[in-house]
Amino acid sequence: MNKYLLGFGAVALVLGGTWFAVKNNGEAEVAQINDVVDNSSSVKEFTITTSNFKFSESMMTVKKGDTVKITVKNMDGFHDFVIDEFGVATKKLQAGQEETLTFIADKAGSFEFYCSVGSHRKMGMKGTLTVLE
Ligand SMILES: [Cu+2]
């Protein structure tokens, strides 16, 4: 191998390295744009009061991917708040107690929330959480 070929090889290596660096830079920019789109979900907060024998809200609507925070305040009697499909429930609350549940609405649909104490659910202590696609 003579000096001329060695020089040519070195130039090719430098050019190749530059092309690789530019290409990777482009991919990093695309990844950043995707992050911005994925951050469109938000936190939705609700406060529900419970009493004999109803919830103050019968409908709540969020979007899939939202973080849902529900504060349950028991004014009167002995109640809890349960959503089976998301595996969340408060403890059974005495009058004057409250508890906040936090979960991610990771599936779309209509889900019943209810009070599991005694026959309260049958007596109308229930409502619907709607998760929009
Ligand atoms: Cu109840």
Image (cartoon, rainbow, N blue to C red):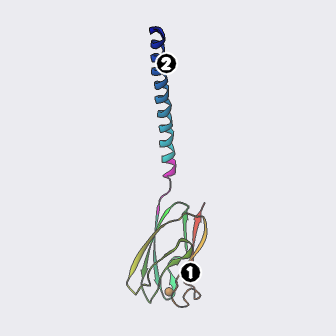
Image point 58% across, 64% down: which residue?
107
Point 53% across, 60% down: residue: 65
In this view, 94 is above or below 62 = below
- How many badges with numbers are in the image? 2
Q: Secondary structure at mark 2?
A: helix
**Mark 2 close to ligand 1, CB under 8 Å:** no
Amino acid type at image mark 2: Ala
Magenta stretch containing residue 37, yes or no? Answer: yes
- On the rendered image, what quadrant is the C terminus found in? bottom right
Nearer to me, 59 or 4: 4
* Residue 25 pos. (x, y %): 47, 33
Label 1 neighbour load within 10 Å: few <14, some 14-19, many 20+ = many
Q: Element under label 1?
A: strand
Place residue 72 in its image quadrant.
bottom left
Inter-mark Cα distance, 1 to 2: 72 Å
At x 54% / y 88%, what residue is drawn?
120
The reply to whether the magenta stretch includes residue 64 is: no
Please identify the quarter of the rendering in which residue 108 is found.
bottom right
The image position of residue 117, as x and y in percent, is: 51, 88
Dot 2, crowdedness within 10 Å: few (<14), some or many (≥20)? Answer: few
Indicate the amino acid at tag 1.
Lys
Up/down of 66 relative to 6, above or below = below
Mark earlier in primary sequence (1, 2): 2
- Which residues make up the magenta segment? 36-43
Residue 50 coordinates in the image, percent (x, y): 47, 82
Residue 126, disc: 1
Q: Give the residue pinned by disc 2.
A: 12
